[in-house]
Image: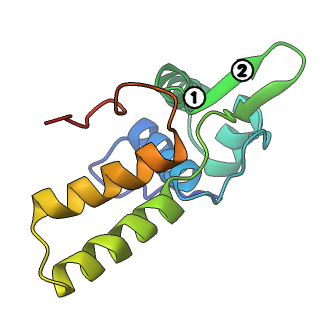
Amino acid sequence: MISIDSSSAVSPVEQIRSQLAAQIRAGQLAPDVRLPPVRQLAADLRVAQGSVAKAYRELENAGLIRTMRGAGTRVNPGHASTEPLIRAATDFARQAAEEGLSLRETHDLLAHAWVQLHPEPSSPPAGFRDD
């Protein structure tokens, strides 16, 4: 799952937090997957329980995981992997550039596609300008 480099200048807390966050965002840890208990992960990684607990708190504050009494700590289902979307957007941007489209034209195409899928709202999604 994760590993700790004891010779690294990066703290164990940050190593745990960043590795788990990357795995969640990449979809390697699926929604609702249960993470190891603090004691177990600390023992497995040979770090202090407080380091694991702090990393879990930071991940929970970021909305990536949730802790429920009696159910343990789980990957938050609201944080599905964005990796497939990033790949699709990159492919779309590459094709648009190969066709000679400007950033604005590419944006307009994407906004048009979004509106076709969501015709009811009168306003475009957050981040899109309606000029």
The disc at residue 75 is none
Q: Is residue 72 left or right of residue 57?
A: right
Q: Furthest-bottom residue in view?
A: 98
Q: Percent position (x, y) of residue 93?
A: 27, 71
Q: How many marks?
A: 2
Q: In which quarter of the view is residue 74 placed?
A: top right
Residue drawn at point x = 34 percent, y = 33 percent:
124
Q: Which residue is mark 1?
A: 56
Q: Amino acid at mark 1?
A: Tyr
Residue at 74% x, 40% y: name it.
Answer: 35
Residue 56 percent across, percent down from the top left: 57, 28
Location of residue 66 with respect to 20 vertically, above or below: above
Residue 42, image x, y percentages? 65, 39
Q: Residue at coordinates 64% horizontally, 60% vertically from top-left?
A: 28
In this view of the protein, which residue sits in the foreground, 88 or 73?
A: 88
Task: From the top left corner, tell me how far across and down residue 86 is, in percent.
Answer: 41, 62
Separation of residues labelled 1 and 2 (CA atoms): 9 Å
Residue 43 vertical placement versus 65 (above, below): below
Give the label, 1 or 2, closer to the camera. Answer: 2
Residue at 54% from the left image edge and 59% from the top image edge: 26
Residue 2, quarter of the rendered image: bottom right
Q: Quadrant of the N terminus?
A: bottom right
- Residues packed near mark 1 inside 10 Å, few (<14), some (14 to 19) or many (20 plus): many
Dot 1 or dot 2: first in sequence order is 1
Nearer-the-camera pick, 27 or 61? 27
SS of the residue under disc 2 = strand
Can you identify the residue that label 2 sits on? 67
Looking at the picture, which amino acid does disc 2 mark?
Answer: Thr
Q: Secondary structure at mark 1?
A: helix
Taking the image as shown, residue 113 lies to the left or right of residue 27, namely left
Disc 1 to disc 2: CB gap under 8 Å? yes
Image quadrant holding the C terminus, namely top left
